[in-house]
Image: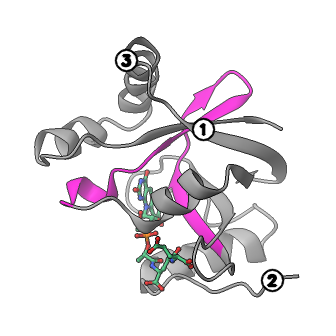
Amino acid sequence: MAEYVPSPIKWVREQVERYEGSGGLEGTELLDTGLPVIIVTHRGNKTGVIRKTPLMRVQDGAGYVLVGSQGGAPKHPVWVYNLRESASVEIRDRTEVYTMRAREVEDAAERSRLWSLAVAAYPPYADYQAKTERVIPVFLAEPA
Ligand code: F42
């Protein structure tokens, strides 16, 4: 078993601790919004350690749309590089945990459809895209 290395960002680390520590009964929403969050467990592509990243929950049937927005920051979040390197992820949605494969969505029509779902679930994603030069990466995680 690889070692789990928590996020260096305090509020993110604490969300993961509450969410996972309660078996998915607590800490499942984004602070101040009440909107649901999932936990994506993946591997560091350089270190090989286990990383846990909370993201907004955007559902597409049995799949989940993963949006690398990072608040519209100029650079992609680091987890994007981990998923590009290795598709294998575990997704916790409250009390359920699924083994999934995540692929980056390249097709323009598919990305547009999934982006609409993402913005409907979490409207600030549209503001984040507007404030950054980069095209925000979108992944679709589907049952493995
Ligand atoms: N971020 C989003 O991008 N989208 C969301 O929808 C979102 C929602 C959300 C909801 C709740 C919450 O608590 C946080 C939320 N976040 C959301 C923030 C998200 O959880 C991440 O914190 C954020 O996207 C930044 O991700 P990051 O991977 O850049 O995190 C950094 C701070 C980090 O953890 N860095 C690690 C470190 O030690 O500096 C390294 C991480 C890593 O994976 N390293 C790789 C390795 O091999 O281990 C090397 C990677 C490489 O290629 O360099």
Q: Is residue 52 left or right of residue 121?
A: right
At numbered mark 1, what does the secondary structure look like: helix, strand or loop? strand
Q: Is residue 70 left or right of residue 96?
A: left
Residue interval drawn in magenta: 51-74
N-terminal label among 3 and 2? 2
In which quadrant will I find the N terminus?
bottom right
Q: Tag 1: residue type?
A: Arg
Q: Is residue 30 above or below residue 124?
A: below
**Which residue is identified by label 1?**
103
Q: Which mark is residue 108?
A: 3
N-terminal label among 3 and 1? 1
At numbered mark 3, what does the secondary structure look like: helix, strand or loop? helix
In which quadrant will I find the C terminus?
top right
Estimate the x, y position of residue 125 in percent, counting from the top left: 29, 40
Q: Residue at the location (33% across, 58% down)?
A: 76
**Which residue is identified by label 2?**
2
Q: Is residue 93 visible?
A: no
Q: Residues within 10 Å of mark 2 (few under 14, many from 20)?
A: few
Q: Quarter-wise, where is residue 39 in the image?
A: bottom right
At numbered mark 2, what does the secondary structure look like: helix, strand or loop? loop
